[in-house]
Amino acid sequence: MIWRKTKNYFFITILTLSGIAVLIPLILIIIYVIKMGFSSLNWQFITHLPRPVGESGGGMAHAIVGTLFLVGLGGIFSIPLGIMLGTYLSEFKKDKMAKFLRHTIDLFSGIPSIVIGIFAYILVVIPFKHFSALSGGVALGIIILPIVTRTTEEILKLIPGTTREAGLALGLNRTKIIWHILIKGSRAGIFTGIILATSRAAGETAPLLFTAFGNSYFSFQLMQPMASLPAQIYTYAISPFADWQRQAWAGSFVLIIIVLGLNLSARFFMRQKS
Amino acid sequence: MLESLPCRRMQNRQDLITLWLMRWLAAMIVLLLILLVILLCKLALPAISKFGLGFILSDTWNPITEEFGAFPFIIGTLITSFMALLMAAPLSVSVALFICEICPKQLGRLLGTFVEMIAAVPSIVFGLWGIFSLAPWVQNVVTPFLKNTLGFLPFFQGPSYGIGVLTASLILSIMITPTICTFCREVFNTIPSQTKEAALALGATRFEMIKIAILKPSYSGMIAGIVLGLGRALGETMAVAMVIGNTSRLSLSIFAPGSTMASVIANEYAEASNAIHLASLGYIALLLLAITLIINSFARFIIWKWTPKI
Amino acid sequence: MKMILVLGLWVMSLSLGAVTKINGAGATFPYPIYSKWFSEYHKLKGDIQFNYQSIGSGGGIQQLLQQTVDFGASDAPMSDEDLKKASWPVLHIPTVIGSVAIVYNLDGVPNNLKISSKVLTDIFIGKIVKWNDEALKKLNPQINLPDKDILVVTRADGSGTTAIFTDYLSKISSEWKNKVGNGKTVSWPAGIGGKGNEGVTAVVQKTQGSIGYVELAYALTNKLNIFSLENLDKVFVTPSVEGTSLAAASLSDKEYLGDLRLSLVNASGKQAYPISAFTYILLPVKQNNAENKEVRNFLLWALTKGQQFAPELHYAALPKKLSDSLIKKIKALKD
């Protein structure tokens, strides 16, 4: 008995210690990044364009706007599509095509983002002979799609079958049930999924390296290259210039605020509803 | 009870349109995946026909003589991912246990949320942190320590740049810990509290309860979480490219620089010097795709086998 | 909400007006001066935006061939094979002359250590691995070199700087030529790779005991230690704008009129720095193309007024003879 008790205390202590030993550094890293970023941030950073190499000052206004534009572009393609496909997976799950689709979506969510970048390059950049915001949007869209599809499916699955039966009993057809009862009823959940998906896409760098490319100016044209926050951070992070490194930290701070802000608001939204 | 809408014997015209529209869209997505594979194959074709399967085992990567082989990158990918897994898997499981079973419920929920937040931090931010904090630490603290204790092994010899295979593995392990931990937490949370109480009621200590009532039934679930973490590590690009040192030379030492499949694509794709170089990068992308798809399918398979038991 | 609207309108107003957008990509070697030029040129002509991405010379050539950019930039001239693949004839327009500095980071050691071409080759081939190697000590007898590993830093991407540097190593060492060769990307026998001149500079800056090769401007603006390198006349020369100019002065008039894909490496001249090179803008000869016309206008400016920015950014301006003949050449292109 004493042996068992000692063993118990021993392992519980080890578990506790290792839990703390992992959690504390993780938390410290995030705090460190946020602290570094916040102290590097200034007003110029969010309102100005980059300066020539080696001159200090300037900012990433164009990249912040670019990231929002690219994520929006990806979302326009893939959010409605993802909702429809998620509905299809949940509501017609016995349909033959649905089985194929489920596997495809699973596979899509596992594709490394760099491979998606190559795909978008071959699909959009080469035929149009232009690095473009469009190709970046396509790449981000492919990243957003499986997440929205899966969350929509999961959310709709939570709706009890009686709700559907009630709809049928009222004489509604299936389309109306899907639209008026199921989707409208789980707006909050689907919205959460959308926010999570876009926050993930906003942080992606690899698929943008050879699609949206980069731009030193504001650009709002689909067929022109466009700057993005992660790609700009990458360029500045590996540079030797102290002011650029400072801006990389500031950029990370803005990016974290965007991503975690979206994430937390999704969570908050979810909790409010449930 | 209906879990979903019945799709047999549909007569309503609107419904048929909806169903066919959805089927059509679904078919498009399936086709998109097929198109992706075909386009990648087409890109890689010159390299496939020139080097064949020998590409996988050849360790020359020389754009001047136009000889290419993926071996250094495959090894780099596997070593960094598995080292990361070795560090992250036991720790993630114990963190998940700590959060679920040991610390008070309220605190546990808070910590759980925090871990999920970390999982959402973009990899470029980890890369930035890796360059400026982790790499100097590895060079000045970890490397001398390992050299003094384990320096007689060939894996811990040679100079350290700070950036290299070890740093890349460390950063990967930090990045996949939240992923595995979150997944394991979900698995542990599915275990009904009666089971745990029953174990305690039979006189089990806390540790025995965790062993019997929690770890045993969630064994395959944990494996699935770990494999998903592996999938994430294999495909990770930016953070690794920033701290691994980018060289195609193979080395026994974990302090030495290396390269992964994803990082070599990120570095060289936009600037490949000739057609066969580009095709070889396409070939690597194809191999990377194949590996991650297999790993992920394996994880899904485990999840699928494990799901009905609950 | 109002804030967002105002911000949106402000952003929109920036994008309005018929702005000609020109995309270029390539060399990181001249990026400091190019970004200065494009920024100055934009101040002169507000309706023209040059978006230049420094992705490496290899990328510049590759993207020009894929036609995804309006002009490319490279320090390594295009090969005949690449020129054949291009959809249009491509003109090589030298813009400035730069030098590749051999830089190092070693505490307690003064700037401008001496290095011979032989020792340099041996370090990059992986034969000399310690800072206190006899060969290095012999060259720097008064200096106390520490017993530390030499950490070699090279380029990870397709790079003109690499092409110039390996061209030099191949010229001075047959062993290098046979074992490694020269090109934009080579299979390095030693070292780690950084991305771009920026990346290599950053790694050297952060790593004790490292040695690397970067464009002079990067070395000077980031205050790295620079080696004095032995030139063809056995004189140890620290890279400078003057030394770079002298390397170009060795060219004959006839060479100025050729297709200009010239190597300045290992030039003769007592004070000439041995690793200097032209950096080129690759101009596709297209007709009836608005962007192409603007690139030509820009080049005319860069070859005249633009040259004055070169020395302060540590590049050497082109010899007058050369820029005059280039201007003639560009003006001769019809729309």
Image (cartoon, coloured by chain):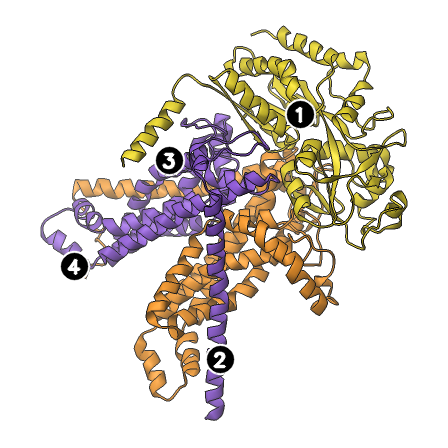
Chain colours: A purple, B orange, C yellow
> Residue at the location (68% across, 12% down)?
C326
What's the distance in space between the residues labelled 3 and 2, CA to CA? Answer: 51 Å
Q: Residues within 10 Å of mark 4 (few under 14, many from 20)?
A: few
Relative to A230, C241 lies left or right: right
Disc 2 marks a residue whose amino acid type is: Phe
Task: Say if mark 4 contacts mark 2, CB within 8 Å.
Answer: no
Do badges 4 and 2 share one subunit?
Answer: yes
Mark 1 or mark 3, whichever is nearer to me: 1
- Badge 3 is on which residue? A73
Label pair 4/3, CB-CB below 8 angstroms: no
Instruction: Give the residue type that dot 1 points to.
Output: Glu
Q: Earlier in the sequence, mark 3 or mark 2?
A: 2
**Residue, far left:** A170
Q: Quadrant of residue C53?
A: top right
Q: Quadrant of the N terminus of chain C?
A: top left
- Near mark 1 (Cα within 10 A), the count class, few <14, some 14-19 or many ≥20, is few
Name the element at disc 1.
helix
Label 1 lies in what chain? Answer: C
Q: Amino acid at mark 3?
A: Leu
